[in-house]
């Protein structure tokens, strides 16, 4: 049975329009998922899950949540209607992040402990194939044309390029220190890479697999060592990249065309990952040390609400 919780909520300003979407937040230290009603901006339920939940997404049909239960060495499949775990998928050791294939049938999982990418067939719920990659893989993405799966290797400081036709790793692109997350632009012409310890976001050209630009960040009053880029998400129109800056306690809104920061938005402590609403009006930031989610008005470039969640929020999935 779902455990319902009552939480305090302080909104900086009223949110005028009614939202239908639901947010699902993985709480890394709380071993739980917080369920947020976007219309009221309140946490309406807390579901117990496996140990150290991190990566989170929904299946294409919207019926299930997929969750990396890192300490349980499994990807859990959770029924959205009941909040119950219905299956533990064979993910490999210490899954941290994953990417659901464009057709929704395969889950590509980064296994941090055994330096591999595991592909899970969701129809059979079995491992389809596995590819060895560099040390400490974390961020995963598939190119829009379906040709590539890319995986970051934090320890090696590279992005691994896996050719899906041959199911082999064919190249590795050197990056700044500790790449944590990767995100393709919708047209597939750019791969954005968050290099956490390098303090940068780098852009690679998938045609050449070379770095073509490096974005730096500077916030008055924030030390360089606190600028730790992690999660990246694009708005649906592709015009804005929303970048979580870790211990800087800010999110950067970057113009994707000019690659210039148009705003820094202060959020909660140690922002890990972000999500964007389907209409592109708002972003949501998971703040790992303040145990809350910041709601950002993207047009205004400011926080308009804060929602208390479980301990150590890490990832966010948005359901329409």
Image (cartoon, grey):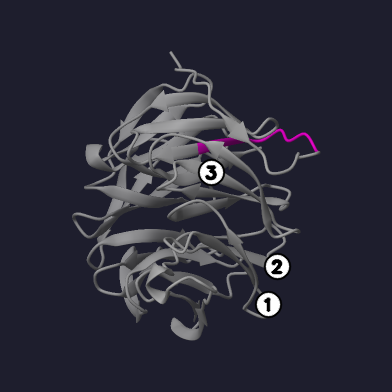
Q: Is residue 237 above or below residue 21?
A: below
Residue 201 in the image: x percent, y percent? 48, 74
Residue 205 in sight here: no
Quadrant assignment for the N terminus: top left
Q: Is residue 94 above or below residue 254?
A: above
In the displayed orientation, state which residue is furthest to the left: 114
Residue situated in front as seen by the camera: 254 or 308: 308
Q: In the structure shown, which secondary structural element does the residue marked by tag 1 occupy?
A: loop
Quadrant assignment for the C terminus: top right
Magenta segment includes 19: yes
Q: What residue does disc 3 label? A: 293
Residue at the image point whose x is 57% and y is 32% from the top: 36
**Disc 2 versus disc 3: nearer the observer:** 3
Residue 316 in the image: x percent, y percent? 51, 44
Within-10-Å neighbours for mark 2: few <14, some 14–19, many 20+: some
- Disc 2 to disc 3: CB gap under 8 Å: no
Mark 1 or mark 2, which is nearer the start of the sequence?
2
Which image quadrant for residue 189?
Answer: bottom right
Residue at the image point whose x is 25% and y is 62% from the top: 136
Q: In the structure shown, which secondary structural element does the residue marked by tag 2 occupy?
A: loop
Q: In the structure shown, which secondary structural element does the residue marked by tag 3 occupy?
A: strand
Residue 289 in sight here: yes
Q: Is residue 90 above or below residue 272?
A: above
Marks 1 and 3, how far apart in space? 28 Å
Magenta segment includes 292: no
Mark 3 or mark 1, which is nearer the start of the sequence?
1
Residue 20 in the image: x percent, y percent? 71, 33
Q: Is residue 33 above or below residue 247?
A: above
In the displayed orientation, state which residue is furthest to the right: 16
Identify the magenta region: 17-24
Q: What residue does disc 2 label? A: 239
Q: What residue does disc 1 label? A: 257
């Amino acid at each position: 049975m779902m455990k319902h919780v009552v939480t305090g909520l302080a909104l900086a300003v009223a949110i005028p329009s009614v939202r239908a979407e639901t947010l699902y937040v993985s709480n890394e230290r709380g071993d739980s998922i917080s369920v947020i009603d976007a219309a009221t901006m309140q946490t309406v339920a807390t579901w117990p899950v496996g140990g150290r939940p991190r990566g989170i997404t929904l299946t294409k049909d919207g019926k299930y949540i997929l969750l990396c239960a890192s300490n349980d060495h499994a990807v859990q499949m959770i029924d959205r209607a009941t909040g119950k775990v219905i299956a533990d998928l064979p993910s490999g050791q210490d899954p941290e992040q994953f990417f659901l294939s464009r057709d929704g049938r395969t889950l590509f999982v980064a296994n941090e402990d055994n330096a591999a990418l595991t592909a899970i067939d969701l129809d059979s719920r079995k491992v389809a194939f596995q590819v060895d990659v560099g040390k400490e893989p974390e961020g995963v993405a598939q190119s829009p044309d379906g040709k590539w799966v890319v995986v970051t290797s934090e320890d090696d400081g590279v992005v691994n390029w896996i050719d899906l036709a041959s199911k082999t790793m064919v190249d590795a692109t050197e990056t700044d220190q500790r790449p944590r997350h990767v995100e393709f632009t919708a047209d597939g012409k750019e791969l954005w890479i968050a290099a956490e310890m390098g303090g940068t976001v780098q852009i690679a050209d998938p045609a050449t697999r070379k770095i073509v630009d490096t974005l730096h960040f500077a916030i008055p009053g924030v030390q360089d060592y606190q600028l730790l880029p992690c999660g990246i998400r694009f708005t649906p129109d592709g015009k804005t990249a929303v970048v979580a800056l870790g211990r800087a306690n800010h999110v950067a809104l970057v113009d994707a065309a000019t690659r210039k920061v148009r705003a820094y938005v202060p959020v909660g402590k140690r922002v890990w990952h972000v999500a964007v609403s389907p209409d592109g009006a708002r972003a949501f930031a998971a703040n790992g040390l303040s145990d809350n989610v910041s709601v950002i008005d993207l047009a205004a470039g400011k926080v308009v609400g804060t929602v208390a969640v479980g301990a150590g929020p890490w990832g966010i999935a948005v359901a329409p």
